[in-house]
Amino acid sequence: MMLEKCSFCKKGECIKPVKVEKNHPGKAAAKIRIEADGSYFQINQDGGAQKLEKAKITLNDCLACSGCITSAESVLITQQSHEELYKMLAFNKTAAPNEQKLVVVSVSPQSRASLAARCKMNVLETAKKLTTFLKSLGVHYVFDTTFSRNFSLLESQREFVKRFRKQSEDKKALPMLASACPGWICYAEKTHGSFIIPYISTAKSPQQVMGSLVKGHFAEQQHLTPDQIYHVTVMPCYDKKLEASRPDFFSQEYQTRDVDCVITTGEVLRLLEQEGISLSDVDPAPLDTMFSSITEEELTSHSGGGSGGYLEHIYKYAAKELFGIQVDTIQYKPLKNKDFQEVTLEKDGVVLLQFALAYGFRNIQNLVQKLKRGKSPYHYVEVMACPSGCLNGGGQIKIEGESSKDLLQQVEKLYESLKTEIPEKNQTVNELYEHWLGGMDSEKAAKALHTEYHAVEKTSTGFNIKW
Amino acid sequence: MKEALSLLCRLPAHPDSRCWYLAWSPGGSLLASCGGDRVVRLWGREGPGWACRAVLGEGHQRTVRKVAWSPCGTYLASASFDATTCIWKKQPDGFECVTTLEGHENEVKSVAWAPSGNLLATCSRDKSVWVWEVDEEEEYECVSVLNSHTQDVKHVVWHPNQELLASASYDDTVKLYHEEEDDWVCCATLEGHESTVWSVAFDGSGERLASCSDDKTVRIWRRYKPGNEEGVACSGTDPTWKCVCNLSGFHTRTIYDVAWCHLTGALATACGDDAIRVFEESSPAAPQQPTFSLAAHVARAHSQDVNCVAWNPKEPGLLASCSDDGEIAFWKYQRPEVC
């Protein structure tokens, strides 16, 4: 892997080591000459020079590396973009029937709200018109990850109660930390590794639960193998692309990912622009109800904010299960800043549950440092990498001339305009637990709905630089 | 002819390694030094010379790059290539490491205390600048992580009396930050240098900033508030900073440090050509176009790169310097009659 000009360099001579593939074992190490323009030449034994290619960093290299010196902007995310979706749709048009893939797009409610704000429509209209648009391109089904989020919420709340009950035997049972945000997960694995991993909930994110649903249950229903489905998700951030590429979400058996391609809300807008289509001009289509959250023609959501509502659902469930207390409204207490808020359940002056929301890097920092010093008072923390949460993700649509604060408020309003539903009450979810997974406590459920984390080993840089 | 800058004393402060940085205690009686030998040393006057009063070891695993005293003089912060910042507290029998700040991904390049004593800033090769807050229980919490620079951040320094922070970077710019609502934001970017900016220093009033660079120049920037008399345009409520002077042609190598004396206004520089130079502003000063002239130049101030120059905050004309050769030198500066 070739590295760029090292910022240690005081005197203008680059002293970084360059790793060169040894094609000829036994021969002497290659000599490298660095030109004034920064290009690298390998000097062969006979004195001839060969210009060396700049190495491209793939997503997985980036995910795995803990000592990356190249700037983030130079990471090439070539495997996942709306261009890739175009390629698949184009392929489908000319492929033989038995080679064609079934294209499924799962849209996140955050992306939908962002599109609604941009196109100046309500959420239901946006969903219906987006369905028409995607299907006009060759997509077969359009689902809503609010549906798969039910599983993430249910699994998280049950996992919390289990952990709470065994906290005296397991020092790392609590605080339980949210697992739906890949930005947080990647940082945690890379920077805090085996210290922090035991605290992280093992429940899969809504994106990945949808992956299991689509490539598992849905594929079976359609009499297809998982690799015959091309599953795309529309997400409010770029880190979801990293999540989809995790080896844990790749089926060795079928050599296919649970989520093949993640496109951001912004990339959907680019798709619309490339097609010359204005979403508001499109006719609405009926929604695909199979894996969407619709009751009586109405789209539903979950309470607890734009990042999924993990804190609220776990809190209410735990209050009931552990203490028999029914909680209807939750009082948030903002701390140092608006992205760090506390919720406390007290009875007769005793604190029963203490939960927190920690959004944004600075708050995550403080949380982890407190945890390391044994000074964290929380039982559960909903950790999200983006300040203001998922509605403010890096892949959401920005509007020229509008303040990002105003825009965020609009998106929040649209997101919250839907009726909320309690996961336990969703009939389809209950049926799937029964018929697809063989019960809530089955092994199949554990495998389909939970995941693992892996500490990234810090490579010693071996530079021995004295600067 | 009397020399403007004369050597008082030389010390082998960090044997067999570089001495990276120096910081005078607020009272002016102690000088902290740090180096490649991973320790911080404190020096105090002893007769005509200086002696080592304390060694702060076992704090860091790698080079200590910078040290900074809290305004009250009770705490000393040390920034290290081991990615941590140690906070040392003065105790009756010496200094003790009371906290280690973690979080930067790699080498911490600088640390600085705000004039209030409640805030601390650190910066790193990871391109970020962090602002930390310390509470009554001496607990440090990260208040903001600023990712404005696009490259290694070399130095951070606070305005002398406001909560305004300046940073210098390998990306050739100087950036300024202040608090807005519940977060810190970058409120100005000073462009002009053609290479790495290694250090910045505010003048005593805080209306001007000096920056030094690998491009061998020192630039003086002046703050213009909105509605200023000179008609300099400002966007919104933020002041604009304009470059009002460019000292070029004086240094033959990278300039690693610049120090602006708050007592006398003299500007000292530490250079990769082993020299120390002192500049004085010609008076009467024309604020929009100040001119600085070279008042003193010691060509071989050290036997290797000079990394830092520091004016004593209480004793006018007392300057300390340190070098890659591991030595600290003390100088007496007297403004020459004719500049």
Image (tube, coloured by chain):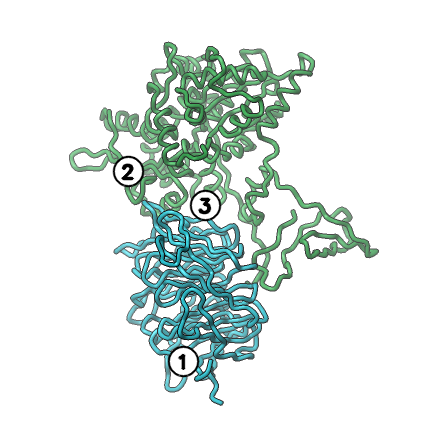
Q: Is residue B336 above or below residue B41?
A: below
Residue B207 found in image quarter:
bottom left
Does residue A450 appear left or right of residue A175 in this picture?
right
Sequence-earlier tag: 3 or 2:
3
**What residue is at 52 percent from the left and 58 percent from the top?**
B192
Q: Residue furthest bottom?
A: B1
Distance of mark 3 from mark 2, alpha carbons? 24 Å
Q: Is residue A254 above or below residue A434?
A: below
Chain for mark 1?
Answer: B
For label 2, the crowd category at 10 Å Cα-Cα, with few meaning under 14, some 14 to 19 and many 20 or more, is some
Q: Nearer the viewer, residue A69 or A192?
A: A69
Question: Measured from the top left, where is residue A127 in percent x and y?
Answer: 45, 18
Q: Which residue is mark 3?
A: A192
- Whether residue A229 is visible here, answered yes or no, is yes
Tell me the element at label 3. helix
Q: Is residue A140 above or below residue B50?
A: above
Chain for mark 3?
Answer: A
For label 1, the crowd category at 10 Å Cα-Cα, with few meaning under 14, some 14 to 19 and many 20 or more, is some
Q: Which residue is mark 1?
A: B51
Question: Measured from the top left, where is residue A377 in percent x and y?
Answer: 29, 42
Question: Measured from the top left, where is residue A256 in percent x and y?
Answer: 60, 25
For label 3, the crowd category at 10 Å Cα-Cα, with few meaning under 14, some 14 to 19 and many 20 or more, is some
Q: Are marks 1 and 2 in contact (CB under 8 Å)?
A: no
Confirm whether circles 3 and 2 share one chain: yes
Q: Which chain is cyan?
A: B
Identify residue type, mark 2: Glu
Tell me the element at label 1. strand
**What residue is at 44 percent from the left and 83 percent from the top?**
B336
Return the mark for residue A342. Answer: 2
Identify residue type, mark 3: His
Q: Nearer the viewer, residue A444 or A459?
A: A459
